[in-house]
């Protein structure tokens, strides 16, 4: 009886250790919160996003959707969009990114094919964006590499954490 109890406790402990020690997901499927954007080019900067907000990327088995505000600080609330100046509209809508479509992964590269986007150019026939990506547990980083027009001269890097 004592040997049976030791065996049962041993199996329970091994099972619990196996659950706790399971490897993290190797899939990008899920809901991701952007926590940092590194922007290169003439005005390089790093935007740290400490609070929840409209910085979500969702990957399903074949589709993705992402929304981001690639700017620092709160955007102005326009009292009357119909009366806003062009500069006011650019300040509010310029840093906002919204896009959805299909994606594929291959050899450390993430290729997206937007079907809906704030930018009409992103939805043009044959449009795509290739990112290098790295998945480390519940952290996903991706960097722009190229699109249908060629390499990005000023790529950005996004760092995301899995929230679901």
Image (cartoon, grey):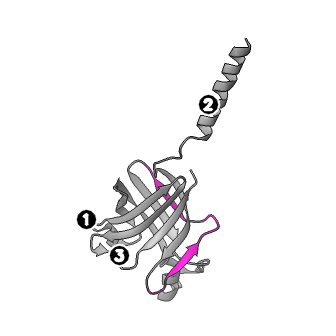
Q: Is residue 42 above or below residue 116?
A: below
Residue picked out by circle 1: 126
Tell me the SS state at disc 1. Answer: loop
Farthest-out residue, top: 1
> Is residue 85 in view from this perspective?
no
Position of 162 with respect to 13 (left or right) is left
Give the label, 3 or 1, closer to the camera. Answer: 3
Q: Residue at x 27, y 74 (%)?
A: 149
Looking at the rendering, in which quadrant would you find the N terminus? top right
Q: Is residue 81 above or below residue 141?
A: below
Position of 19 with respect to 103 (left or right) is right
- Asked if marks 1 and 2 touch (Cβ < 8 Å), the reply is no
Whole-number angstrom distance, CA of label 2 to CA of label 3: 48 Å
User: Of marks 3 and 1, which one's residue comes earlier in the chain?
Assistant: 1
Residue picked out by circle 3: 152
Give the label, 1 or 2, closer to the camera. Answer: 2
Q: Locate residue 14: give its quadrant.
A: top right
Whole-number angstrom distance, CA of label 1 to CA of label 2: 50 Å
Q: Is residue 16 magenta?
A: no
User: Of marks 1 and 2, which one's residue comes earlier in the chain?
Assistant: 2
Badge 1: residue crowd in 10 Å (few <14, some 14–19, many ≥20):
few
Give x and y (percent) for residue 19: 60, 37
User: Of marks 2 and 3, which one's residue comes earlier in the chain?
Assistant: 2
Give x and y (percent) for residue 35: 57, 66
Q: Which residues are magenta?
A: 42-60
Q: Residue at x 60, y 80 (%)?
A: 76
Q: Locate residue 109: give its quadrant.
A: bottom left
Badge 2: residue crowd in 10 Å (few <14, some 14–19, many ≥20):
few
Give x and y (percent) for residue 140: 50, 59
Give x and y (percent) for residue 40: 45, 79
Give the numbered dot on residue 15: 2
């Amino acid at each position: 009886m004592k040997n049976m109890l030791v065996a049962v406790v041993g199996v329970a402990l091994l099972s619990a250790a196996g659950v706790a020690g399971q490897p993290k997901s190797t899939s990008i499927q899920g809901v991701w919160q952007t926590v940092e954007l590194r922007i290169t080019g003439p005005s390089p900067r790093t935007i740290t996003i400490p609070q929840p907000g409209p910085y979500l990327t969702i990957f399903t088995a074949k589709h993705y959707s992402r929304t981001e505000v690639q700017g620092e600080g709160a955007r102005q609330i326009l009292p009357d969009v119909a009366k806003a100046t062009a500069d006011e509209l650019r300040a509010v809508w310029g840093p906002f990114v919204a896009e959805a479509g299909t994606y594929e992964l291959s050899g450390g590269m993430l290729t997206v094919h937007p079907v809906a986007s704030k930018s009409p150019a992103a939805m043009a026939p044959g449009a795509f964006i290739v990112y290098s990506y790295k998945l480390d547990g519940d952290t996903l980083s991706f960097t722009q590499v190229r699109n249908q027009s060629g390499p990005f001269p000023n790529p950005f890097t996004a760092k995301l954490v899995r929230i679901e």
